[in-house]
Image: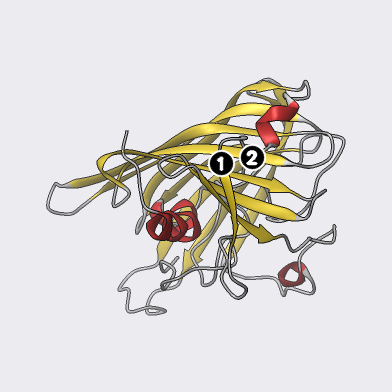
Amino acid sequence: MKTISSAIFFFLLTSAVYAQMGPPPGMPPGGGPPRGGFGPGGFGPHPGKVVSGAPYSADVTNSLVRNLPDGNSIQRTTTGHVARDNDGRTYSQETITGGFLGQNGPTTLVFLSDPVAGYSYVLNASTKVARRRALKQFQGGAGPREHNRPANPNVATTDLGTQAVNGVNAQGKSTTHTIPAGAMGNAQPLVSTSETWYSPDLQVIVASKRNDPMYGQSNYALTNIQRAAPSASLFQVPSDYTVQDEPAGRGFGPGRRPGPPPAQ
């Protein structure tokens, strides 16, 4: 198993989980960071929101296959385990295979979010160091980008109803996003389609898939979902780790990226 230095570890956490795979399943092309992703606590619509009273644990898989015009292909896979306790603490362990982060072998990232104590942690197994940063709380409801957003005539959404998905009831929707011809130098319209299944009980997306002409085919799924409260030890920094505070102004959350985000 590949290990990484503290500096690279922070770069990986800020950019890899949200950039390595390209736009996450269900997210249309556009600008800015995704409103959700394969990160702490699972794939939810509002990263940073604290969800209490809905504990769960699950295995997670996020994959991308992109076929190139010359017959070459790009394949990336992220697998892992996510969990949340009754108080909204989250745990995420992710192993990335393929792409920049996994080119020399699988790379494992582990991070915790503890809204009760007010900190998030990045755990580096190679150095036994837990980097800590004060957690900015998300105040329930929709984020600021969700308010008063005008309807996009190039986006069509269809309600797929409710059904059992991977063992839980989920609400489905399909979305077609069209980039008109000439909008970005494209000779013909670019059409991407996605299908997303969201669990109201868990407040996370349990399955999503996307077909995009620029980014390829993406699939995301939570499996082996357990509704019982996970062990409390899962959300604690191991006793043999040294806790170091991350300097102010630096971050490792979804809203912080050390480099330019990928164009969606």
Image marks 1 and 2: residues in contact by CB distance under 8 Å: yes
Q: Is residue 217 above or below residue 146?
A: above
Can you tell which quarter of the image residue 226 is in? top right
Camera-side residue of 205 and 128:
128
Q: What's the amino acid at mark 1?
A: Tyr
Q: Is residue 223 above or below residue 23?
A: above
Characterize the local packing of mark 2: few (<14), some (14-19) or many (20 or more) Cα atoms within 10 angstroms: some
Q: Residue at image x 60%, y 66%?
A: 255
Q: What's the amino acid at mark 2?
A: Val
Q: Quadrant of the N terminus?
A: top left
As helix, strand or loop, the secondary structure at mark 1 comes to loop
Identify residue for label 1: 241
Camera-side residue of 190 and 247:
247
Give the percent coordinates (x, y) of residue 151: 70, 71
Identify residue for label 2: 237
As helix, strand or loop, the secondary structure at mark 2 comes to loop
Q: In the orientation shown, which residue stands out farthest toward the left?
A: 70
The answer to whether residue 221 is visible is yes
